Structure formats: C-alpha cells, structure tokens
C-alpha cells in the first residue's frame, strides 16, 4: 500500500513540470508588446494628442498604454521593428511633453516630464530630443524646478535607470553630476540632442540649426549650411500644408500690444455670448451672421472647434439667401469634399454664382477646375485667363501663384517664361505668400529667371516659409491661450521654443514674461535671459526689443550697466524703423528729452528737452502728466527727494503690460507724493 506522503511528492513534481512547460511556452514579452501596439487606433490617438489638444484624454490613454506595455528593460524590445519602437517613443513623448509644458494643471513638472522625454529620445523620437535640447541649453531644470525628483524617478523606473546609465545619457543628470554645470559640457550635450532631432527632420530643430549657423550662435557662421537647414524645413512645411489643406488663418500675438491683448481678453470672455448672438441672428435669417457662423466652424474660431459639417450647414443656408461668399465657400466645400461628398458639378455651379457676384477668390477656384478638367473640359489656356483676371483685376495672390506655376511648366498653349514667372513669384513672396516664397527661394537658388544667386536673399524666403510650420502655429496658439489665462510658466516654455527657432515674436514674448513675472528662481539669471532674448529679437529688427534694451541701458538692468549713449543710439534706431507706432515714438522722445533736461551723458539743454517733450505730447496726450513732474523738478531745484522722483519718472514707461490708464494712475500717485513732499518741506521751514 502506497503511503499518502508519496502522493504528495508526486503532486509537487507534477506541478513543477507543469510550471516549466508554462514558462517554456509562455508568449515572449516582445510579442505581447507587439499585440498591444497593434490594437491601438493611432489615427484617433494622434488626433487627440496633436490636432485637437485633448491633453487630458491623451495623457490618460498614454499612461494606460505605458502600464499595459510594462517595459522594464531594453532587452524586452530588442527584437521589435523600428516602426513599433517609434510608436513606443510617441507614447512616452506624449506623457513627457504634457507634464513638461503643464498642459493639464498648468504647473510644469519638468522632472517628471524629463524622465519620459529621456526614454522617448532613446528610441529616436526627434520631438523629445528637441525638448531635451531646450531644457539643457536654457538650464530649465535648475532654474524652474531644482529638486531631487529626477533622482527619485530614475531609481523607481527601471527602464529610465538603464537608459540613464548608457554612454549617450550618462552625463545627463542635473542633480547628482555637478560637473554638468560647466558651460562646455552643457553646450556639447544640448547640441547632440539638437543635431539628433534635426536628423529626424523635425522642423523646429532644422529651424534652430539654420538660425544658429546664420548668426554664429554656438557654431561658426555659414550661410550655406543655414540655407541647407532652412530649405529642408521649408520643404517639410510645404508638404504638411499640402497634406492637411491648411489655411493660414492664425495671427501671432505680441504680448506688449496692449489693445490687442485686452481685446483678446474681451473676446475670451465674450466668445460664448458672441456665438449665442450669431446663432440667434442666423435663425432669424441674418445673412451676415449665417456667413460668420460658417466661417467660425470652418476655421475653428469664435470659441468653437473646427467642424466642416457645421460649416457646410451654415453656408448652405447662406446660399439659399443668395449670399456671394456663401456661394464661394459652399463651392469650395463641394470641390474638396469637406463636410460633404465631393461633387464637381455642384462646386462649379456655386463657384460660378459667386463669380457672377464678383467674389474675388472664385476666379482662382474656377481656373483650378479648368486646369485639372474637373467637371469641365480640361483647358489650360482658359485656366490661365481666369488666373490672370483673378490677379490683375481682383488682386488675388493665389491666382498670381497659379500664373507663375503655368509659366514655369510651359504646357500646351502656355509657353515657358522664366523671367515673367520670377516677377510674379517676387510679387507674392514679398507679401509673405507661403508657396510663393518657397518657389521664389528655389528660383533664386538655381538661377531660374534671375541672374542673382545670393544666399542672403534666398535664405530669407526659405526662412519665411520655415517659420510657418504646424508646430510653430500650434505653439503660438496654445501659448497665447495660456498667457490670456495667466498660466505664465507654461506660456513661457512654449514661447521659448519658438524663440530658439529664431522667431522674433517668440523671443520677444518670452522676454516680456521674464521681465514682468517670476519664472526663474535665480533672478539674476532671469535678467540675463531677458537681455539675451531681447538681443536676439533686436538683431532681427524688432522695434520693441530695441526700445526695451534702450530702457535697460537708460536705467541699468541685469548685466547691462547704465549707459545713456547706448540707450540713445538704440532709441534713435527704433524711432527710424518703419511701422513704429505712436506710443513707442512718444516713449522714445520723452526719454531723450529727459537726457537733455537732466544732462544724462549729453550737454544739459532745457530748450532741446522742451522740444522733445512737446513732440512727445503731440503723439500721446497723457504724457503731459509725467512732463508736469519734470517741470515741477525744474522749478523747485531744492525739492527734497528730488533724486528719487527723477528715478521714478525714468521708470514711467517700463510697464509693458499695463494699460494707459494704469500708467496715468501711477503718475497721479507721483503728483500726490510730490505734494506730500512739499507739505513736509513747508512744515520744516
């Protein structure tokens, strides 16, 4: 008889063997990862994360996918195809950039963001590599969030820890490796990420390198190398615009433009009211408001998301009321299949109705249909005639571009004429037409229709195109929204990226945020960065950058010591710039008047000072209030606190974000203060 103990031994042996068989035939980890990646709907995932700004949904899904993937070491993914590794890198990038920019709670978490960006960049993600360049090059971890969180994330995340110990990343440690503070090491590491991102043909990285080589920032000057990077970036932009059927509808915003900023604040508060008003009036048959609603939905303005189906609905209503613009847009929707199925017959019908009502763009669209033979018989000569009328009589830039294209192609009845094509390209490129600028730059580079082959001219137009990348437009849009909602750190990080690309409004806006708000912990470094960014914007001819640097030399700021001669030179350069507004002119004239009034590095001359003051008052009437302060000081030479009051007058124009009425309130306060000084002085006497 078998003892029970033997049965127990047999059961243990059987269970061990079963476990061995289970382990032997367990699905490899790489196969598990592949299955998870295959089940992701990347079209919707990409839309949420990149196109629709659904950051909350994007983050939740990305974190869920990260947990499902459960990657603990690099060996688990060695056998994966590069396309699958790219998908993994995108998941980690989305988590990292959302934390880094503070897209959810508007409080940038640089340490956590950095952790995910490092993992993503290891797999070759150019977006992550570019953000790592931004972080290192501008010392952001040390200046915005200098804590030990990165060490914690490194220790708790096995994959991050393994990557951080590889040769490429071993020096990337802001909290443990104090040697990284050395300028040479920091620049070397940051540039390695920048070049890696550019190899991935990421437009912001290409723009940044083009900008650096063009100006000799951190590299030697080379127009030819800069041209190579800007040309590649502009090609990416043109390809993206063509693929997405984009419209250049978004205006960049300068934070120092008081009226525009205040208007945008008002628009934000009133968007819902405006939309309700449009809907109400449209329901009553108001043609203008029906058209406006269609445009709002077509472009995603007025506080609504882009919705071509709604746009089609409203333009159909407008067309029933014989509205010319509704005819045109309805024709375009049928032509492109936006919000409805493509229908060339209906497109031709509505575009012809728009043409009969003298709608400018309709000539170009009808020319397009004749050129490609859409519903009508293909007729390039007739297309050319339509384009010519559209440009010469209606001043439509798209028609000008199409004429240029036909002259370059030289098909059938249209003969090659490179000189005429060059002339047309020049006209629209000068207006900033994206496609026109690209073709004009290409014609200059290869001497097509032009005898001049100038790198400086060619690169200028490639740069104009490169600055209109999807990434740049999105960053400006989001940064402006964050600024309007007072999320200043998140707005700053986005503007800084644009500034690194060489976009002067990115440089100016990030400098203005540094000047007026607490962004960095080290205030000296904050002043240093403010000056650095303004100098970059000034080199591109930005008027306000010149004035602000003039003010910094006028008063002394950061690393800029007080220097009235340099201040005067910058003021005069800004004053002579085309496009300068009256407020800036008044500002300059008043400060130069102060120099002559008090003898700041010029011979004191009250008469000359008076001329400057009066000219300033003609431009901005409220300047008579600070002028009154100056007159009081001139009349009462023995006034106590005279030096203090003089310094306050010098600072009157330093409120770059304040409205005119706030500055007037400040001046009235100063007048009351002077009256108080008088009363004290009289009591002592």
Image (cartoon, rainbow, N blue to C red):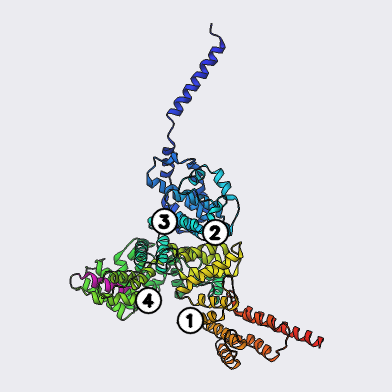
- Say few, some or many: other residues with alpha carbon within 10 Å of mark 1 (under 14 / 14 to 19 / 20 or more): some
In this rendered view, identify the residue nearer to me: 608 or 197: 608
Marked residue nearer the N-terminal end (2 or 1): 2
Name the residue that disc number 2 marks. 140
Do the residues under discs 3 and 4 have CB atoms within 8 angstroms?
Answer: no
Report if residue 566 lies within the magenta region.
Answer: no
Name the residue that disc number 3 marks. 197
The secondary structure type at the circle numbered 4 is: loop
Question: x and y percent of residue 326 in the render?
Answer: 39, 72
Q: Main secondary structure of the magenta part?
A: helix
The secondary structure type at the circle numbered 1 is: helix
Give the side of residue 429 with respect to residue 683, left or right: left
Question: x and y percent of residue 196 in the render?
Answer: 41, 55
Q: Residue furthest left?
A: 412
The secondary structure type at the circle numbered 2 is: helix
Do the residues under discs 4 and 1 have CB atoms within 8 angstroms?
Answer: no
In this rendered view, identify the residue nearer to me: 159 or 8: 159
Marked residue nearer the N-terminal end (4 or 1): 4
Q: Residue furthest bottom?
A: 607
Residue 228, numbered circle: none
Residue 573, numbered circle: 1
The magenta span reads: 398-411
Question: x and y percent of residue 624 in the render?
Answer: 62, 88
Residue 285 in sight from this viewpoint: no
Marked residue nearer the N-terminal end (1 or 3): 3
Marked residue nearer the N-terminal end (2 or 4): 2
The secondary structure type at the circle numbered 3 is: helix
Residue 431, numbered circle: 4
- Say few, some or many: other residues with alpha carbon within 10 Å of mark 3 (under 14 / 14 to 19 / 20 or more): many
Q: Quadrant of residue 351?
A: bottom left
- Say few, some or many: other residues with alpha carbon within 10 Å of mark 2 (under 14 / 14 to 19 / 20 or more): some
């Amino acid at each position: 008889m078998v003892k029970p103990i033997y049965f127990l031994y047999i059961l243990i042996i059987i269970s061990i063997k079963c476990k061995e068989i289970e382990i032997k035939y367990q699905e490899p980890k790489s196969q598990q990862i592949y299955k998870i990646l295959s089940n992701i709907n990347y079209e919707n995932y990409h839309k949420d994360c990149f196109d629709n700004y659904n950051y909350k949904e994007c983050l939740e899904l990305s974190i869920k996918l990260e947990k499902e993937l459960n990657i603990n070491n690099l060996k688990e993914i060695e056998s994966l195809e590069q396309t699958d590794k790219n998908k993994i890198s995108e998941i980690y990038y989305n988590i990292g950039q959302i934390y880094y920019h503070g897209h959810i709670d508007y409080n940038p978490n640089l340490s956590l963001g950095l952790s995910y960006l490092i993992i993503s960049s290891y797999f070759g993600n150019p977006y992550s590599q570019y953000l790592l360049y931004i972080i290192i090059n501008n010392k952001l971890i040390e200046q915005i969030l200098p804590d030990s969180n990165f060490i914690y994330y490194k220790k708790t995340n096995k994959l991050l820890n393994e990557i951080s110990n590889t040769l490429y990343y071993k020096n990337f440690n802001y909290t443990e490796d104090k040697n990284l503070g050395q300028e040479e090491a920091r620049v070397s590491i940051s540039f390695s990420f920048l070049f890696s991102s550019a190899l991935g043909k990421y437009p912001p990285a290409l723009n940044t390198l083009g900008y650096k080589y063009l100006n000799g920032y951190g590299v030697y000057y080379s127009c030819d190398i800069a041209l190579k990077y800007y040309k590649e970036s502009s090609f990416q932009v043109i390809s993206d615009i063509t693929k997405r059927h984009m419209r250049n509808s978004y205006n960049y915003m300068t934070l120092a433009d008081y009226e525009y900023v205040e208007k945008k604040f008002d628009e934000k508060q009133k968007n819902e009211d405006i939309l309700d008003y449009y809907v109400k009036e449209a329901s009553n048959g108001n043609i203008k408001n029906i058209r406006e609603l269609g445009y709002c939905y077509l472009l995603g303005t007025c506080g609504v998301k882009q919705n071509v189906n709604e746009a089609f609905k409203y333009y159909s209503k407008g067309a029933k009321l014989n509205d010319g613009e509704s005819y045109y847009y309805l024709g375009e929707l049928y032509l492109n299949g936006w919000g409805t199925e493509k229908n060339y017959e209906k497109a031709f019908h509505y575009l012809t109705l728009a043409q009969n009502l003298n709608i400018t763009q309709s000539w170009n669209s009808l020319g397009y249909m004749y050129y490609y033979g859409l519903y009508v018989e293909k007729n390039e000569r007739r297309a050319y005639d339509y384009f010519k009328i559209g440009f010469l009589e209606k001043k439509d830039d798209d028609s000008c571009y199409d004429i240029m294209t036909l002259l370059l192609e030289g098909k059938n009845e249209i003969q090659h004429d490179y000189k005429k094509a060059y002339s047309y390209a020049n006209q629209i490129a000068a207006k900033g037409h994206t496609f026109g600028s690209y073709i004009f730059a290409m014609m200059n580079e290869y001497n097509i229709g032009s005898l001049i082959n100038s790198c400086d001219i060619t690169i200028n137009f490639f740069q104009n195109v490169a600055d209109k990348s999807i990434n740049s437009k999105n960053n400006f849009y989001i940064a402006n929204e964050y600024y309007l909602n007072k999320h200043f750190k998140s707005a700053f990080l986005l503007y800084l990226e644009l500034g690194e690309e060489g976009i002067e409004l990115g440089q100016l806006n990030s400098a203005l945020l540094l000047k007026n708000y607490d962004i960095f912990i080290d205030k000296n470094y904050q002043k240093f960065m403010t000056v650095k960014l303004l100098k970059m914007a000034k080199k591109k001819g930005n008027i306000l950058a010149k004035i602000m640097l003039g003010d910094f030399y006028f008063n002394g700021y950061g690393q800029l010591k007080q220097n009235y001669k340099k201040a005067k030179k910058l003021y005069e350069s800004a004053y002579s710039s085309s496009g300068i507004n009256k407020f800036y002119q008044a500002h300059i004239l008043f400060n130069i008047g102060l120099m002559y009034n008090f003898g700041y590095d010029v011979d004191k001359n009250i008469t000359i000072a008076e001329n400057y003051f009066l000219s300033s008052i003609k431009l901005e009437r409220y300047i008579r209030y600070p002028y009154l302060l100056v007159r009081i000081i001139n009349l009462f030479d023995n006034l106590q606190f005279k030096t203090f009051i003089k310094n306050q007058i010098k600072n009157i124009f330093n409120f770059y974000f304040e409205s005119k009425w706030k500055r007037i309130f400040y001046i009235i306060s100063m007048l009351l203060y002077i009256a108080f000084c008088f009363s004290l002085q009289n009591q002592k006497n």
